[in-house]
Amino acid sequence: MASAFADVDDRPLSAFHWVAMLTTGMGVFCDGYDISSISLVLGDALRSYGVAHMASVEGGRLTAAALVGSMLGAAIFGLLGQRGRKRFYGLDVLILGVAAIAQAFMPSLGWLIACRFVLGIGVGGDYVLSPTIMAEHANKADRGKLMAIGFGVMWPLGALAAAVFKLCLDAFHLPPDLVWRIVLAGGAVPAFAIMYSRRAMPETARFLACAAEEDAARAAAGAAGSPARADWRPILRDLAAHARPIAAATLLWFVFDLVSYAGALFGPNLIAQNLGIPSAVYSIMAYVLFQIPATLVMAWFVIDRVGRKPLQVWGFVGAAAVLVVFALMRSSPGSSPVAALGVYLLFYVAQTGPGLVSGAGIYGVELAPTRIRSVAQSITVFGGRIGAAISGFAFPVLVGKVGLIPALYGLAAIAVAGAVLSKLLVPETSSRSLEDLSLQPAPAAAL
């Protein structure tokens, strides 16, 4: 089957690839905006509903709501994706746009939490459909670059947009209760802006060929319909046959989100404000000076040329080292707060490595065959969202119980585990066709 897609795999990088990257990546831009914006306005939103402390159970529920909702969204859209990649593409951002606006009008904290849960359904759907569509359209030489830029770069750009928007609103000295509502509702703009181009995206050649092949097989057997749309038994058998690589991709995304979301969600609040820096200013520094440049360099020069595994393994190692050094500096009475901040900002560079691989959903779509790719991706997304939700809910509570320093050591230990698991569990996938990867994974590459 690999030869059937040689024209797709060997096609030179073209304008179509870049348009597809932008169209698929804008959903992750929305996710970056929606997830990070709550961290920028968390304190004001909670105070509007009578909650005084960010490091509280209520704060954890509010930050984790969208992440929990994304688990349901991943499951729903993973099943829908079996009926066609394009067929439901655009519904995800419609949910994102409507829920973003609705946040501004919620009468209570419970309603706001519920609204962000619904918003998360759109996020989870996008995390299934967008990487699947981009991977199936991409050529094999540049697949990593396209996915890494489309998802790894677009997330911090969305987070940066939220921070800049918040800073602009603060300059007008608007009431805090109004500012947080406008900031959260602003996530509707990129969501609605991308709806038309998503509906105009062509169906992927891989899905069309797979559906046609299965329809022909069923017709020959005297049955109606397509297994991709009617019979789940072959899908379950394929999932069982590919359980090991799917489980590995799921676990690695889970570990990455445990580490990265704790820093992304609470860095602007529990860390930056502890050092006397406004959360929006901190976020702009982190993304403009550190994460976005690092992401562009690694996506363009490393992920396809050096490989996925080295990028992920050494990224986890670097993240662990930064967290340990930062914790040591913060626990030392004579350390400089400015120096400590500079060290912590390097976390955004280090975590970019696994962020471009596991965090961009690359392993889930590369290690599963076309006939189960959307379901397999939904499983990996589900695992990642569990990690993100645990971080969103448990990290502020953990900081409140044991303090910031022990919590940082715990995150560092998880990052080390991520490096070891990445080394052991997955093959190198760069510059190989999707069909080759799903049929016969290569041995793990030495680092």
Image (cartoon, helix red, strand yellow):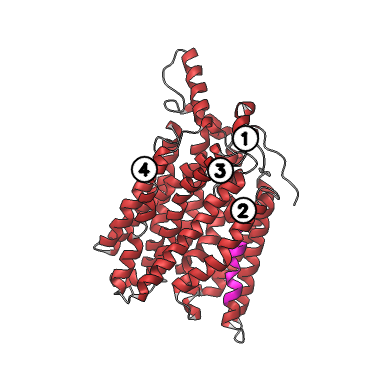
Vertically, is 404 above or below 312? below
Query: Among all residues in the image, which is located at the extreme front?
Result: 15
Quarter location, residue 101: bottom left
CA neighbours of label 1 inside 10 A, class few (<14), some (14 to 19), many (20+) = many
Marks 3 & 4, CB-CB < 8 Å contact: no
Considering the image in quadrants, where does the N terminus appear? top right
Which is in the foreground here, disc 3 or disc 1?
1
Name the residue tied to disc 2.
299
Q: What number is the disc on residue 364?
A: 3
Q: Which region is colored magenta?
A: 341-352
* Mark 3 / mark 4, whichever is N-terminal: 4
Q: What number is the disc on residue 118?
A: none
Name the residue tied to disc 4.
91
* Mark 2 / mark 1, whichever is N-terminal: 1
* Mark 2 / mark 3, whichever is N-terminal: 2
The residue located at (68%, 49%) in the rendering is 307
Query: Among all residues in the image, which is located at the extreme right?
Result: 446
The Cα atoms of the two marked residues, 2 and 4, are separated by 29 Å
Which is in the foreground here, disc 2 or disc 4?
2
Vertically, is 177 above or below 222? below
Q: What number is the disc on residue 9?
A: 1
The residue located at (54%, 34%) in the rendering is 239
Q: Main secondary structure of the magenta part?
A: helix
Q: Please check the rendered image and state whether residue 276 is part of the magenta-colored stretch, yes or no.
A: no
CA neighbours of label 4 inside 10 A, class few (<14), some (14 to 19), many (20+) = some
Residue 295 drawn at (x, y percent): 59, 58
Q: Is residue 401 visible?
A: no
Marks 2 & 4, CB-CB < 8 Å contact: no
CA neighbours of label 2 inside 10 A, class few (<14), some (14 to 19), many (20+) = many
